[in-house]
Image (cartoon, rainbow, N blue to C red):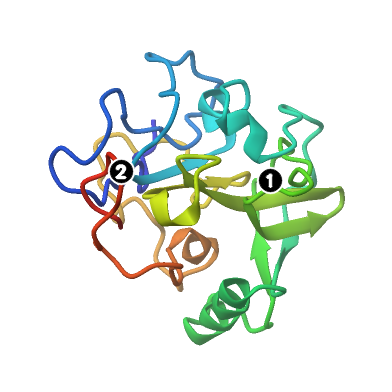
Amino acid sequence: MRTLLAIAVLLCSAGSCAAGQGPQPPCAGVEPVPAYAAPEQLDGGRVFASHYSYVWLYNDTPFSTTANWAVDGARPGNNQIGFINTTFPRGASLATWLVNVKATPTLGQIPIQVLRNDVHGLPAGSKSLDWMDIKNPAVTMHYTFDTPVGTPPAQQCGRVLYDDFHVENVGDSKGMLFPTECAAGPTSSWAIGSPVGSRRAPCLPCTGTWAIRC
């Protein structure tokens, strides 16, 4: 199985993450049977999930409320243009950053491949952020939400990112550590997985039951 790319990069200090939290892997090539139940909430840290990692999201409340899930839909054509949502400041910053790092020559667009069809937009009134979509069919490729879901922003210490495409597409990378498994060449769709900007300053005191606020 390919290296678990950037899974659950927990940016929190000892004791600040709730019991039961754990890594959620990117697509492993098949729909996995979760080895553990998803926590009812994610109090802190970061999770990077893609494709079949929806098993920890689409059927578990409250994560299931963060997107309009329709898992395992007909797969789109493999090579399309991802359109960055520039209607909010961080989306605009992402579009500019992708050009600056030469991931794409076109502002607001980036070529992506190995596309899937599991997220049909975000619910009305959702606090989730839709970062990137494709047009054929019109589905969401990249979205994030902050956690604990449904709490005020000042009390949200975690974040989940879901990609519905393969940010890397390696058939067998057993025994290889990122980034040695990647082919030589310029950064492409991998760039979309890097965090860009933040709503909050890092590691400030957090009220309630959380030790830090990252």
Q: How many marks?
A: 2
* SS state under label 2: loop
Residue occupying image coordinates x 28% and y 31% = 18
Which residue is the site of mark 1?
115
User: At x 71% / y 35%, what residue is drawn?
Assistant: 118
Q: In this view, does 198 lie above or below 140?
A: below
The x, y position of residue 54, in whole percent, is 57, 30
Q: Residue placed at 27% from the left, 46% from the top?
A: 10
- The crowd level at tag 2 (other Cα within 10 Å; few <14, some 14-19, many 20+) is few
Query: Which circle's residue, 2 or 1, is located before the other in the chain?
Result: 1
Q: Where is residue 169 in the image (x, y as percent from the top left)?
A: 51, 46
**For mark 2, what is the residue?**
208
Task: Find the distance from the CA under tag 2 to the CA under tag 1.
Answer: 40 Å
Q: Quadrant of the N terminus?
A: top left
Local secondary structure at mark 1? loop
Q: What is the x, y in percent for residue 180? A: 28, 55
Q: Quadrant of residue 108?
A: bottom right
For badge 1, the amino acid type reads Leu
Measured from the top left, where is residue 3 in percent x and y? 34, 40
With respect to residue 53, does 99 lie above or below? below
Q: In this view, does 175 lie above or below 131?
A: above
Nearer the observer, 180 or 205: 205
Question: Is the Cβ of the residue at disc 2 closer than 8 Å to that at disc 1?
Answer: no
Q: Which amino acid does label 2 sit on?
A: Gly
**What residue is shown at x 68% (from left), y 45% (from top)?**
115
